[in-house]
Every structure is written in C-alpha cells, then in structure tokens.
Image (cartoon, helix red, strand yellow):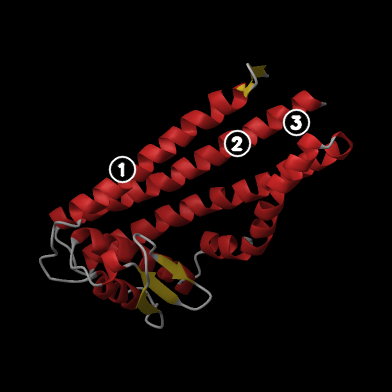
Amino acid sequence: MQIYGLDIYLLLLVAPTAIFAMICQFRVSGTFKKYSQIPSRRRLTGADAARRVCQLNEASHVTVEQTGGNLTDHYDPRRNVIRLSQSVYAQASVAAIGVAAHEAGHAAQYAQGYGPARLRMSIVPITQLASNLAMPLILMGLFISSFEFLFRIGVLCFAVAFLFQVVTLPVEFNASRRALATLESGGMLDSDELYAAKKVLNAAAMTYVAAMAVSLAQLLRLILLSNRRR
C-alpha cells in the first residue's frame, strides 16, 4: 500500500522503531557520559576491572587491549581478546568499569561454555552471507519483474540476519548479569556504584532491543510487500 508514492509500511512499521533506536542511542551516550564523571572509590580502571572479572570467571587466559574510537568495546572470541575504547580502558570511572566488565562477561560465557554465545558465534558466517545478499536480491526482485522470485529469497536472507539478532539479545543480557554479579561478589564496586554501573549497562542493552525491533519491523514490511506482489 502506498500513499502519494510513499510506502505506508515504512511509515507505520519501520519509522517508529527507527526513532526508538535513535532515542536509545542518545540515552546510552548520555548515561555513559553522566556516570563517567563518577570515579571508582577503589580507583580501578576499565582494564583493571576486565582482567579481574576474567580471573574470577575461569577466563584468565583472555588478554585486554586498548582500541580506538568511542564505545567501540568488544570481546573477540576468536583471539581471546577484550578490546576497550579509550574512554574505558584507562578510565577509573563507574561507567568504564561497567562497560569493561560487560565485555569480560562475554569472555566468561565462552570460558564456561554458555550455549547461546557459542550458537551466536557458529552462525556468524551464514548470517554475514545472508545479510550481504538480502538487499541486493530484494532490489533486483523489485525492479526486474522477471526476477521477482529473488525478492522472496532476499526476504528469507533478511530473516536469517534477523535470527542472529534474536540470538544476540539473551547473550548480551547474560553478559551484563555476569558482569554485575562479579563486580559485586568481587568487591570491586559498592552498592551505589553498582547501581550506577547497572544503569549504564541497561541503557546499552536497550540499543540491542531497539536494533531487533527495527529489524523485525523491516522484516514484517518485506513480508507484507511480498504478499502484496503475489
């Protein structure tokens, strides 16, 4: 269905979730900035916290490095490396500790054989292939009438990419739970500091929820468009 040449499904489904995603992104940046101003009483840096969380979760073999960018923190399970951004690695703030501990939580997942994390890792190659193929196939199916079947194949590829985000969500929440539990049991943060770290991680988690919502809305839109074209 179109109104004055506009895709109504884009307006009704995708646009609201895209706005929600932008709000979540602004919120995580603002929350991190706010709690970056609160120093750790124990003067732990993000790197210190990441190493400590790893040690307490059977992941002492994981190394911690600094990487460029802002909030580009991630765990690389292929190389057993936690890479922390400049605003986290050497900063002794509650926000930095929360983010670093979250990435160490991912390292703990792999060290302890957490199933969903391993599943996510195993489907990365097929997900990347499906993600790269989805839009070219959809566009070819849209604009070349004799290739309409490619549109449906593209939608299927998009669904595979969406499945990756579904698997990612519990992995991210679990990493945060592991991080907060270890920060508390390891005595790295006091109760009020732990509350602040949880606020940072909850804000970050909502960006994953928002990303999945955008992808779901886009998938529903593509399915509706596919049904309309039959």
Q: CA distance from mark 2 to mark 1?
A: 23 Å
Residue furthest out toward the top: 3
Task: Tell me if residue 25 comes above or below residue 73 in the rendering.
Answer: above
- Residue denoted by label 3: 226
Please name the amino acid that badge 2 sits on. Answer: Gln
Q: Quadrant of the C terminus?
A: top right
Q: How many marks?
A: 3
- Under mark 3, the amino acid is Ser
For this rendering, which residue is in front, 58 or 145? 145
Which comes before the other along the chain, label 2 or label 1? 1
From this viewpoint, is residue 99 visible? yes
Mark closest to the chain's N terminus, 3 or 1: 1
> Amino acid under label 1?
Arg
User: Residue 201: x and y, percent?
Assistant: 31, 53
Q: Is residue 199 visible?
A: no
Numbered label attached to residue 218: 2
